[in-house]
Image (spheres, grey):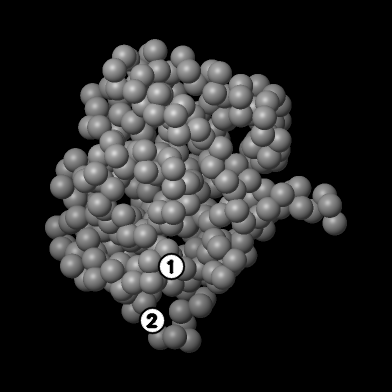
Amino acid sequence: MSRDWSEKKERSNPATLRLICWIALHTSRFVARLFLYPITLYFYLTSAQVRSASQNYLRRIAGLTGNSWQVAKHIFCFSATILDRVYFLTDQFHRFEIKIHGIEHIEAQRVSGKGCILLGAHLGSFELLRALAVQNNMPFKILMYQDHNAMITKIFDSLNPEIAKSVINLANDNAMLEMNERLNAGDMVGMLGDRYIEKDKRLNCQLLGDTVEFPAGPMTLATITKVPVIFFCGVYCGKNKYEIYIEKITEATQLSRGKRDDYVRKTTQKYVELIEYYLKKYPYNWFNFYDFWQDESNKKT
């Protein structure tokens, strides 16, 4: 099983995805959610990689065993957040109960007029925060590999072209320059910091009782651009309920090159500890369905 998430191919069928989007927008959320059950069953039965990744992760959570029911629930929760993206992207927030914790960190940053990094993970729904940012006219950009899962990205972008414009594509040569320009202009730049590609510098961090490599890039960027880092996650709590959590990780910091490495290591671990805290609280919101802890790879050696 590959540790490199970027090698995973899309499994969604574009016609099926468009059909589900149509059903979601032209019927009701109740009707659309009925389709989540056969979708969950399909991925449970046809993807050994998804099952294995879910089992290995769930076994790390106290009180869970990674049995078939729990794995199916894990897949269902992921599918539910994908469906809800349709509603978030089309500004149908009235369908949901959304509680926001820590909004004062965002408000203080907006008042300061200075940029910051909003650092999330594949923990809950990132789309929820992105849609809320656009809805509330927050100066917001997202740094991501737009070409990964290009088919599903294209379909969702078509639902709200304005949100699609908020993306800075990491595959572009000028991505870092554009990001720096936006930070200097006072924008908030969102990114996910729990995956890396092979060329990235990595750090060993402790997550759920084991060592996992995390990219050093996000915290390194924060020190270079001298902006604060704010953690966020939008977790799915069942039915129509979501909770957004926002926490300050670091203030704007200016460091000499000699002190930067230790600072980046400590702040990255702090970020990982926040991920662990919310995983224990909302275990079915972890959406890295690959060999994250290299459990399967270690079995082969």
Rate crowding at label 2 as few (under 14), some (14 to 19) or many (20 or more) other CA atoms within 10 Å.
few
**Which kind of residue does numbered mark 2 sit on?**
Leu
Q: Residue at x 67, y 30 (%)?
A: 46
Name the mark on residue 219. 1
Question: SS of the residue at dot 2?
Answer: loop
Q: Residue at x 37, y 60 (%)?
A: 169
Q: Nearer the viewer, residue 291 or 284?
A: 291
**Which kind of residue does numbered mark 1 sit on?**
Met
Q: Nearer the viewer, mark 2 or mark 1?
A: 1
Would residue 173 be found to the left or right of residue 26 on screen?
A: right
Q: Residue at x 40, y 54 (%)?
A: 146
**Mark 2 sits on what residue?**
255
Relative to 267, residue 70 above or below:
above
Rate crowding at label 1 as few (under 14), some (14 to 19) or many (20 or more) other CA atoms within 10 Å.
many
Relative to 264, residue 197 above or below:
above
Relative to 246, residue 198 above or below:
below
Q: Position of residue 69 (x, y in %)?
A: 65, 21
Which residue is outermost to the right? 301
Would residue 4 be found to the left or right of residue 278 on screen?
A: right
Quadrant containing the C terminus in the rendered view: bottom right
Earlier-in-chain disc, 2 versus 1: 1
Decide if residue 245 is in sight here: no
Q: Residue at x 57, y 30 (%)?
A: 74
